[in-house]
Amino acid sequence: MKILVTGGAGFIGSHLIEKLLKKKHKIIVIDNLSTGRLENIKSFLNKITFIKKDIFKSNILKDFKNVDVVFHLAALADIVPSINSPRKYFESNVIGTLNVLEASLEKKVKKFVYAASSSCYGIPKNYPTTENEQIDTKYPYALTKKQAEDLVLHWGKVYKLNVTSLRLFNVYGTRSRTSGTYG
């Protein structure tokens, strides 16, 4: 299968790619390296197609040729920077997602998996938090991730794109960032 991973040089993306390579999939990675690092994928860089590109600013349509599955992990993260630069977060997280959805639809991608965020719950009242918890987007980051998730689900309903949205909670492990607020 041919699989495209946006944000593939990031923490989650690099681990996903490792697993997909073990299953002998052909992998394309689009990452602008704003938060991802080549160091995360250096051990298998020769086994994938890496494209340094911004999903918000660049034409990505040609990169989706014959792609079967898209894992859309690219996003700007972190709460405080989103308060200081809300437009940057909207462009990356919402418009960037729209661009990836449009390319996926036009190139007839069979499956689209989106990495949403548990930040959409704000500070939850219940632990463990279920997906039915009340949405409370307190910061621009949370809002843009929820808006992008709504786009993904809408594209699934209206355009019959086969979509899955995963609201990830505080993912950590080897290759995760060690700088910034959450490092």
Image: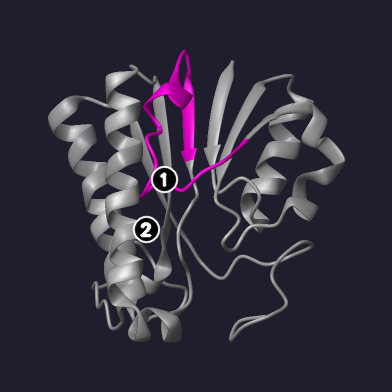
| Residue type for callout 2 | Ser
Left or right for 168, reference 59: right
Q: Position of residue 144 (x, y in %)?
A: 29, 65
Which stretch is magenta?
Answer: 51-71
Q: In this view, which residue lies farthest toward the left?
A: 158
Ranked by sequence position, the earlier of labels 2 and 1 is 1
Q: Position of residue 65 (x, y in %)?
A: 45, 16
Q: Secondary structure at mark 2?
A: helix
Q: Does 64 lie within the magenta span?
A: yes
Q: Secondary structure at mark 1?
A: loop
Q: Which residue is mark 2?
A: 92
Q: Is residue 45 above or below residue 22?
A: below
Q: Position of residue 72 (x, y in %)?
A: 46, 43
Q: Which residue is mark 1?
A: 55
Q: Residues within 10 Å of mark 2 (few under 14, many from 20)?
A: many
Q: Is residue 71 visible?
A: yes
In the figure, residue 164 lies in which quadrant? Answer: top left
Left or right for 19, reference 181: right
Q: Position of residue 27 (x, y in %)?
A: 64, 27
Work out how far the residue at label 2 is from the one at label 1, CA to CA, in angstroms: 7 Å
**Quadrant of the rendering where the C terminus is positioned:** bottom right
> Which of 129/21 is in front?
21
Q: Is residue 29 above or below residue 49?
A: below
Marks 1 and 2: in contact by CB < 8 Å? Answer: yes
In the figure, residue 33 lies in which quadrant? Answer: bottom right
